[in-house]
Image (spheres, grey):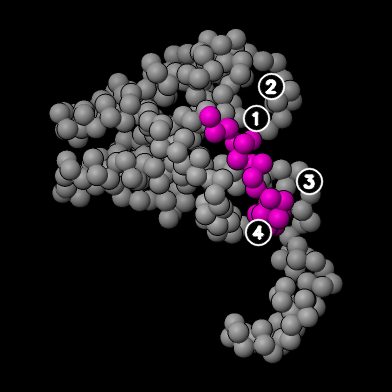
Amino acid sequence: MLRILGGESPESVADAFALSKRHLLVWAESVAAEGLHGWLDRRPVTSERLVRARAGLAQMLVGVIAERHFEQTSTEIVGAQGYRIEDERVGRTDTDYRLVAADGRAICRFNIKFHGTAFAKSLEWVSLEPDDCFALATYKIDAALKKQNAERLPFVFLIISVLKVPRASVEQHISEDWAWLAALTNRATEEAIVNRLLTEPWVEPIRHQVRDAAFRVLSARRAYQLMRDKLFERVHALRIPRFNRVFRNAEIDMHLSLSSEMIGFDQFLQLLANAGPLELAVRFDRGEI
C-alpha cells in the first residue's frame, strides 16, 4: 500500500505480491482519503493510546525474553529426569507451559510472571522491602484457583524478578512508529513487532539481566491462602478510601514476599526428583508450595 501511495504502479505491486490490481487501487484510494485507521475501521490513535501501546509492547518483550529463558534453563534439567515441558502459549490463555511426566500425564501448568518494577512504598503499605515485594492481581489468583479446581491440575505461578529492567527503561527504546502501529492493529501485529524488536542491539543487556535471575515458584492455592490470611495487611487497596479514584485503572493487588513465601525453581525440581509428582501435587493442593 505504501509503495502505491509513494508512486509505484499498481501493476508492479500487484505482480510482486500476486494481488488484484483493482483491489489495490480501491485500497489505495481509501487509505489516501481516510488514513490507515479509517481503512482499518479503527479509531484514530490518541496520545493516551500511544502510551498504552508502548507499555504493552515493553511488557510483552520482557515477557518473551523471560519465557525463552525458562525454556533454555528448564528443558535440559527436566528432560534429564524424564519429564518434559509443553509449550501452551499458542492458545494465548493463562497457561504458558505444562510440566508433563514420561507417561504423558500432566503434573502442573505454569504461568510466567515478569517482575520488573519495584513498589517504592511497599515497606510503608504492606510491610515488605521493595526488592522482596511482588504484586499479583487478586482476580488472577482467584481465576487461577478456579481453573485448578475445575481441571484438577495444579496451577503454578513462575515469577522472575529483574528490578534492573524496569518497564520504563524498555519503553524508551520503542519508537513512536512501532507504538502507533501497535495501537492501530491487533495482538498478532504486536507479536510481530516484538519479534522484530528482539533483534535490536539494545535488547542484549536485558537478556543478560534476565539470564542472571532465578525463577520463584508459587502455587495458586498458596497465593489464595496468603491472600485470605493477610487480606488487609497485604492488599493495601482495601485500606485506601476511593482507591480507584485516586489510582485510576490500578488493579487490586495482593503483595507477596519473594524470599519467604515462594521457593526457587531449583528447589521445586529437587522436590520433583525426590518426592515425585504425586506428592508434589498434594503439596500444591495444600498450599504448602
Foreground mark, 1 or 2, reads 1
Residue 239's disc number: none
Taking the spot 38% from the left edge, 30% from the top edge, the residue there is 214
The image shows residue 135 at horizontal and vertical percentages of: 52, 25
Task: Name the residue tied to disc 2.
Answer: 243
Chain-order first, disc 1 or disc 2: 2
Which numbered mark, 2 or 4, is in the foreground of this view?
Answer: 4
Which amino acid type is shown beneath numbered disc 1?
Ala
Magenta stretch: residue 176 in it? yes
Look at mark 3 in the image and give the residue it sits on: 47
At 74% from the left edge and 25% from the top edge, which residue is drawn? 245
User: Element type at marker 2?
Assistant: helix
256 in relation to 112, above or below: above
Asked if marks 2 and 3 touch (Cβ < 8 Å), the reply is no
Identify the residue position indicated by label 4 in the image. Answer: 185
Q: Which residues are magenta?
A: 164-185
